[in-house]
Image: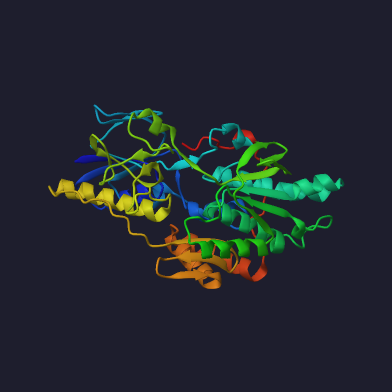
Amino acid sequence: MKHIVIVGGGFAGLQAAKILGKYKNTFKVTLLDKNNHHLFQPLLYQVATAGLSQSDIAVPIRSILSKFRNISVLQGTATDIDFENNRLITDYKNIDFDYLILACGVKHSYFGNSDWEKFAPGLKTLEQAMEIRRRILSAFEKAEREQNLSKRKKYQTFVVVGGGPTGVELAGSIGEMTRYALVKDFRSIDPKLTRIILIEAGERILSSFNPNQSSRATRDLEKLGVQVWTSSPVSTIDDTGIMVDNERIETETVLWAAGISATELNNRLGVDLNRHGQIIVQDDLSIKNHNNIFVAGDQACFCGKDGNPLPCLSPVAIQQGTNIAKNIVRENKKLSRKKFKYRNKGAMATIGKSKAIADFGFLKFQGFTAWFLWLFVHIYFITGFNNRFFIFIKWCTSYITNKKGARIILNNSWRFFDKKTD
């Protein structure tokens, strides 16, 4: 019986495991992840801005795979690979494999300024989402009790760095919170006067969408009170503010949604990497000279038809996990592998309630129609019936009442904040 080891319980790893789990008499599967849960990352910003609770978007990996008796789930971290002996080195033991699937994801890149992380947390993990939520809600609490107007203004200033989907969704959600959810809750401050700035180094936000949709998103953000600064590279971040070009913004709340960097594991393997540290894979998603080791999802660099690397999106990861698993099955049946071909099913980004953009190639939507499609797709793909049901109810309640139901501040200090996302 072939032993397949999967590192990472994200979209790619989980998809591969579900397919291989159907072959209980053919494959033994071990899934290793540093966390015990699968995280639905597209909705992580909703946890960060108090729209959803952690349990709404995270499900224990064991419960997802419990019906597959040939799959074992282990909590641990992969530290290296012994290529010669087909052995995965982990933080607690070595695991021999016949096939290895790496799907560890990525973390945010601070472009060589790693010291910025403590001042501007990224959004890749539940721990980071909870830290961002704490900072956002605490800023309003500090502003409410502050008598000095300049300090109050500083507390009510939020800066989001990165004009991709995550940055846009995060900024829009904060804007929605200040315009609707918090407007009646404070006595000394007016949440609607909150200053929210979205910083993008490029010429426009949402550069993966066409210019018209990018412009529509900019207008929608501005209606929520978000200022959009493009062609504005960040030069410095510290505990009192941020420098954008030569302009200083005084704030205690800077949130990071720009750039990606692969896991530290990639740097130890001695394989070909791109400039982001992602592993350059062959057309069947295997590593050059190691055809029994595959890489999928954000950890992999695979170029599409246009010659550019595929984006770090869940549809890419799911399709790659499927391709790898099916190729392992085919090879076990003495059939040749199939090359990976990405089918672009479109892209979506939400700006706020009833505001979104959707690009399906020949079909493009904006406004309520795009938002409704976004809502349907995210509820459909989230793992677990209970999660779908409760999220739908929460969103309906939030839509009608303009309230966010997860506005609880947990006083977790920075020492509990998981800075290592490898």
Q: How is the image coloured?
A: rainbow
Image quadrant containing the N terminus: top left
Return the x and y of residue 373 as percentages of the image width and height.
48, 69
Question: Residue drawn at (38%, 28%), measured in percent from left and top?
Answer: 268
Which is nearer the eye, 345 or 181? 345
Which is nearer the eye, 279 or 207? 207
Residue 24 visible? The answer is no
Considering only vertical position in the picture, is 243 above or below 68?
above
Q: How many marks?
A: 0
**Image check: 241 left or right of 377?**
right
Return the x and y of residue 292 as percentages of the image width and height.
23, 38
Question: Residue drawn at (54%, 33%), measured in percent from left and top?
Answer: 112
Return the x and y of residue 318 as percentages of the image width and height.
36, 53
Question: Residue drawn at (67%, 58%), measured in percent from left and top?
Answer: 175
**Image check: 5 left or right of 337?**
right
Considering only vertical position in the picture, is 175 above or below 152?
below
Residue 129 visible? The answer is yes
Question: Residue drawn at (32%, 48%), measured in percent from left and top?
Answer: 17
